[in-house]
Image: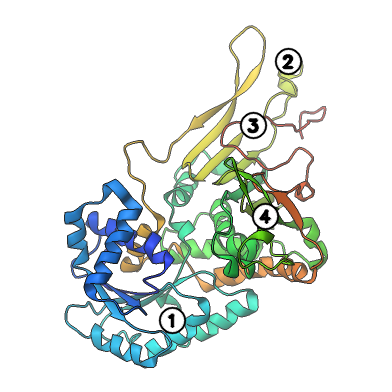
Amino acid sequence: MNAESCTYVIFGATGNLSRIKLMPAFYHLDEAGQLPEGTKIVAIGRREWTQEKWISEVKEMIQIKIKDAFDEKTFQNFAARLHYHFGDLQQPQSYSELATTLEQTQFSKNIAFYLSISPSDFGQVMEQLSKNKLFDESAGWRRAVIEKPFGYDLESARALQRRISQYLTEEQIYRIDHYLGKGTVQNVLVFRFANVMLEPLWNRNYIDHIQITHSESIGIDSRGDYYNGSGAMRDMLQSHLLQLLTLVTMEPPVSMEAEGLRDEKVKVLKSIRPISKEAVHGHAYRAQYASGVVNGEKVNGYLQEAHIPADSITETYASMKLYIDNWRWRGVPMYLRTGKRMKKAQSVISICFRHPPLQFFRDTVAHNAVDRNWVILGIQPEECIRMEMTVKEPGLEMKTRTSSLDASFRHSDEKAIDAYEDLLLDVLKGDRSLFLRFDEVENAWKIVDPILQVWATERDYVATYPAGSWGPEDSRLFDKECQGWRTSLTPESSTCKVNSDGID
């Protein structure tokens, strides 16, 4: 699938996302020769900046991001693609002026609109773009990239979709989840479907449970207003972690084409057992970080952060247990959690296999000491795939230890690629594989909505955990006493007991 020249129109180009992610990603794509000739980047901003001012701002963004890797000659070539357009989203005149600008011959008639703006502005912006015929595909394709959140709950997600679909077809909408652009996440598909030795084991007969953890050591920074209205469940679990779950558990798609891949992901979401409101407390847990110590520094609790009401019950930690009621996974618990101000920042998928029958070792020291096998998929910051195996220790006695087989995702001399680079390029190619279809969004909201509704009514108490810890005590989620959150990418000893037949 080849990339075509395009005019990328960035709404919110002077905002934080553009500074930290979008402009550095465009720069790296151009540096790598991936932006087709004729591709331009049009920034929409409310500041009355000149073209020279905008180029200097972009230069600063990129220098801050890549530091010593910045190359002046490369940037000058990139700067030729940049164009600044002054415009206020609230003023209809801005859109007619944009339409006039885009009619100039220097701009490709293939146009991608990147909406790095509040979801509350999506409808208005799209309405004005439509009124000015900027979604008309008679001269070239038109696509709209939308950042999450895709709604606040199921009802608002459907309302947002109804409004957007007045102006765009589903094929024109690119709902971006940067998590799915990470190389390791894509490698999950290769790991599963390109290694035939794993397929016979990837089911309820051999896998005990699956854990997906996304922990952050940072707090909410300056995002208090947004975060207090969102919380950890909406911010991470409903989107990123459920997407990871679908990739780990889905059936092999008929092809790697976008619709085949997305069809299988939706099947997983539809197969997840609904959580009734009466069962919420057995399937989900929430908490807030209190004051504590992170990296040797004392930090405030959530309620002491800027713009947070003193009586807020918004969760900064959320965990839940799900079951996928299909042939492959029935009865296998799936544990997902996310939290801020935790001990370490990491994203990891941990697949725990069942205990082997141990009658073979019944007269040896190894009996009841053989650990479970794990497959560990490190997403960030350490990108890795590890398989943990039990091996015999050197010596005369039958003693065992766990050894790790490491299939590193990237060699030391290979450059890391930011997720946004992949995704921005996929928009040019028209490849929707790593973007969310609306039925994915809708079914994800159906899973978490009952939890959010119950939590909304329970306003008198929320558990806390010290900043710098691994989170609250939520062991009641686990089906077995020996199950618990895995916190390390290196081997951990199992505490599961086995019965006399060697089966746990």
Q: Which of marks 3 and 1 is nearer the N terminus?
A: 1
Q: Where is residue 102 in the image (x, y as percent from the top left)?
A: 25, 83
Q: Position of residue 123 (x, y in %)?
A: 48, 85
At which x and y percent is residue 371? 67, 28
Query: Does residue 33 lie above or below 489 as drawn?
Result: below
- Residue beneath disc 4: 301
Task: State the CA–CA distance, disc 3 to disc 2.
Answer: 19 Å
Q: Is residue 134 above or below residue 437?
A: below
Q: Where is residue 354 in the image (x, y as percent from the top left)?
A: 68, 37
CA separation in Å, label 2 and label 1: 65 Å
Single out the residue that lies furthest toward the top: 396
Find numbered disc 4 in the image and state the secondary structure of the residue it sits on.
loop
Residues at marks 2 and 1 touching, judged by CB atoms closer than 8 Å:
no
- Estimate how packed mark 3 is, as few (under 14), some (14 to 19) or many (20 or more) residues with alpha carbons within 10 Å: some
User: Closer to us: mark 4 or mark 1?
Assistant: 4
Q: Nearer the viewer, mark 3 or mark 1?
A: 3
The kind of residue tagged 1 is Thr
Mark 4 to mark 1 CA distance (whole Å): 44 Å
